[in-house]
Amino acid sequence: MKKWHIFLLVLLLIIVLIGGVVILFWHKKVKEGETTQEGTTQGNTTEAVTEAPLEEVQVGELLEYRFSPGYSDMNGASHHETLTKDDNGNWVIISRDRDDMEDPMVETTYAVSDEDVAKLDAFIKENNVLGLMNRPESDDFMTDYSPWGYGMVYNNSSLGGSEHEIYGIDEYHKYTHSDYELMEELDRLFEDIHGETISEVTESEDE
């Protein structure tokens, strides 16, 4: 065999070996990314933490529940929903939606039964949802223009606390696999309690 043939063979083997090492390294990094990152409610990612029990949070009477799925673009999209009582003391969900900053805000009000509110309240307490707010803060750079988040207001006077205590769970914390599953189940439950549409109002530009 000629020397240049041997040289080409050795060179080919070296290229194959280097390519194999690169592929193995890339595969390892991809697997690490899959095991250390989880999608949030709206598909954003943040570093996951080791599975650990949530710190117990005791609360009293539910007064309000707020939810925003968040958005990552600059188009001015907005979506916020609030479960609260109207002036007549009836539970309603007020949904405020806008797809673009040039579009008017649309406010839709849905009826909600007392039984469904009780189900939501029981789910939050039985699964210690508020314990999620005690997860460690994330090191993720804040890139979303409207991060997702939950807000819950409770009257804790029966527990010796405030009559209007606000609790918040936001995007920039480190959550576990179970945490995300819990939030997804909470989202499905909240979506299910939307009753019949009471009203839909499109705000004018001068409002």
Image: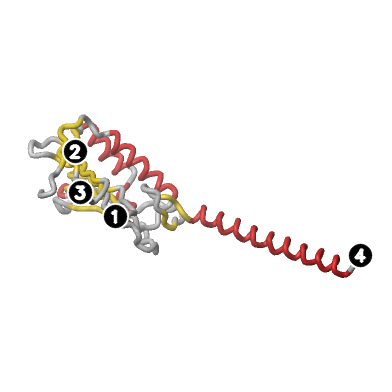
Residue 150 placed where, x, y %? 27, 49
- The secondary structure type at the circle numbered 1 is loop
Q: Residue at x 23, y 36 (%)?
A: 118
Q: Which dot, 4 or 3, sits closer to the camera?
A: 4
| Residue type at the position of mark 3 | Val
The residue to which callout 2 is attached is 108
- Amino acid type of disc 1? Ser
In the structure shown, which secondary structural element does the residue marked by tag 3 occupy? strand
Q: Nearer the viewer, mark 3 or mark 2?
A: 2
Mark 4 or mark 1, whichever is nearer to me: 4
The answer for how far apart the CA atoms under marks 2 and 1 are is: 20 Å
Picture coordinates of residue 50, whole percent (x, y): 46, 55
Q: Residue furthest left?
A: 87
Residue position for label 4: 1
Please state which amino acid type lies under the numbered disc 2.
Thr
- In this view, the residue farthest toward the top is 196
Dot placed on the residue nearer the N-terminal end, 4 or 1:
4
Tell us which disc is closer to us: 2 or 4. 4
Residue visible at 29% across and 43% down?
124
Q: Give the side of residue 178 with respect to residue 134, left or right.
A: right
Residue 146: mark in rendering: 1
Please state the horizontal and vertical placement of residue 178, each as a whole percent of the image: 42, 47
Cα separation between marks 3 and 2: 21 Å
